[in-house]
C-alpha cells in the first residue's frame, strides 16, 4: 500500500505565495515521476508541473516563471513553491506519483487534494 499525503494549502491574497508538500509512504522501491495537478470548479483536472527522478521538470504555460517544483528523493517528497499567485490559480491541487513498489509493480497514486484559494 502507498499513501500520498499533501499539506500546505490555504487562503492567500493575490500576489502572495504558498508552498505545497506531498510525502509518499508505504511499500516504495522508487518513484519515477512526481507531479502536481489542479482542478478548479467546473473545469477538468490539469497538469501544473512534474519532475522526474533526475530532476527534469515540466511546467504548464500558465505557471511558468511563478511556480517551482522540486523533490527530495530521500524523503519521497515533492514540493510546489507557488509565487505571484493569481485568483485563477484557485483550485484543489492534487499530488501524483508513478510508484515502483517493493515488488517492482509500477502504478500511479494520487494524494487527497489540497485547497488553494487566492482572494483578497
Image (cartoon, rainbow, N blue to C red):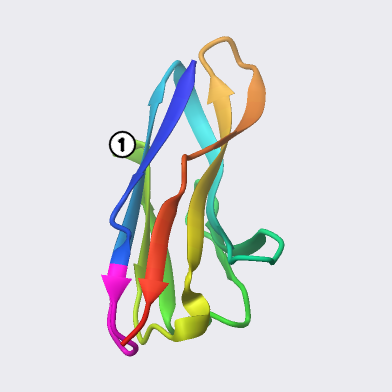
Q: How crowded is mark 1: few (under 14 residues within 10 Å), some or many (20 or more)?
A: few
In this picture, is 96 found above or below 68? above
Residue 118: x percent and y percent? 38, 78
> Total of numbered circles in the picture?
1
- Residue in the image at 28% along x and 83% along y: 16
Residue 66: quarter of image:
bottom left
- Residue in the image at 51% along x and 51% along y: 94
| One can see residue 91 in this view | yes
Residue 100: x percent and y percent? 57, 25
Residue identifier under label 1: 74
Q: Main structural element of the magenta stretch: helix, strand or loop?
A: loop
Q: Does the magenta stretch include residue 13?
A: yes
Which range of residues does the magenta coloring cover? Answer: 11-18
Would residue 82 be found to the left or right of residue 61 on screen?
Answer: left
Residue 58: quarter of image:
bottom right
Question: Which residue of the protein is positioned furthest toward the right in this rendering?
Answer: 44
Residue 69: x percent and y percent? 43, 63
Task: Tell me the SS state at disc 1.
Answer: helix
- Residue in the image at 63% along x and 62% along y: 47
| One can see residue 65 in this view | no
Amino acid at each position: 500500500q502507498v499513501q500520498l499525503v499533501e499539506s500546505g494549502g490555504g487562503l492567500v491574497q493575490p500576489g502572495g505565495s504558498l508552498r505545497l508538500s506531498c510525502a509518499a509512504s508505504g511499500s516504495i522501491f522508487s518513484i519515477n515521476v512526481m507531479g502536481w495537478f489542479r482542478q478548479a470548479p467546473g473545469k477538468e483536472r490539469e497538469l501544473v508541473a512534474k519532475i522526474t527522478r533526475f530532476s527534469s521538470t515540466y511546467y504548464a504555460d500558465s505557471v511558468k516563471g511563478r511556480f517551482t517544483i522540486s523533490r527530495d528523493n530521500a524523503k519521497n517528497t515533492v514540493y510546489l513553491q507557488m509565487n505571484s499567485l493569481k485568483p485563477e490559480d484557485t483550485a484543489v491541487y492534487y499530488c501524483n506519483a508513478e510508484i515502483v513498489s517493493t515488488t517492482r509493480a509500477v502504478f500511479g497514486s494520487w494524494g487527497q487534494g489540497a485547497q488553494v484559494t487566492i482572494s483578497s
